[in-house]
Amino acid sequence: MTKGYSTLAVDLRGHGKSILKDGKKIDFTPDLSTPNKIKESSKRLDKFYDTANTQDDISLWIDALEKQGVDTNHLIAIGSSMGANALIKSLEDIEYRKLILISIGEIEGAQMLLGISTTPTLYISSINDALGSKEYSLDYMPSTLKGKLLLLNGDKHGTANLAVASDEIMEFVGR
């Protein structure tokens, strides 16, 4: 990591080692190896996970950082797939220094939220993403006041795009 940056990873509901409200423990790791596996993983996640509270989860996480004395006025947020969608929803409450959205999906009200935010935003999508990330990026991009789009060759989804896009991400962040 570049000097002067700290990183924190948030385990959103339904990913990593999460606990559902009925007390059942889950360990959801999506299979991103092929377009069909990505679609299957997405359907499997949708059966037991409701994304309605993710923006609240992010707001609570940032509130907790502020209570610990962290200056949250300089946050650069990176979200992948469901995390990218959650970050767009969180724009209702939070203004980031920069926002990096990898493999976004369909989000109700995204154009409005992105249109009122002044956050510089980098969209990253694979051209043949099985979940349609490229189309959503192209749809949301015109609403973004300060946006940049990076389309990658291939069919990767989510964090599978990080290795290919790392140089562009660091340039956008401002090494």
Image (cartoon, rainbow, N blue to C red):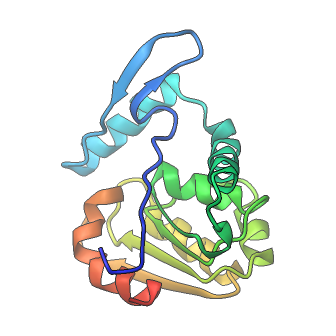
Work out whether 128 lies above or below 45: below
- Which of the 4 image quarters holds residue 162? bottom left
Answer above or below: position of 109 versus 141: above
As drawn, the residue found furthest toward the left would be 33
Residue 157 appears in the rendering:
no
Q: Looking at the image, which residue is at 64% across and 42% down? A: 57
**x, y percentage for residue 13?**
52, 34
Dividing the picture into quadrants, the one containing residue 45 is top left
Residue 28 x, y percent position in the rendering: 35, 30
Image point (34%, 81%), residue name? 3
Q: Nearer the viewer, residue 74 or 133?
A: 74
- In depth, the one of 1 and 37 nearer the eye is 1
- Left or right, 133 with respect to 167, comes to right
Corner quadrant of residue 16: top left
- Residue 62 shown left or right of residue 166 in the figure: right
Q: x%, y% of residue 39?
A: 35, 42
User: Of 107 and 4, which appears nearest the observer?
Assistant: 4
Q: Quadrant of the N terminus?
A: bottom left
In the rendered view, tell whether residue 29 sits above or below residue 123: above
Q: Is residue 87 left or right of residue 135?
A: right
* Residue at the (26%, 59%) spot, across then down: 160
Tell me if residue 50 can be seen: yes
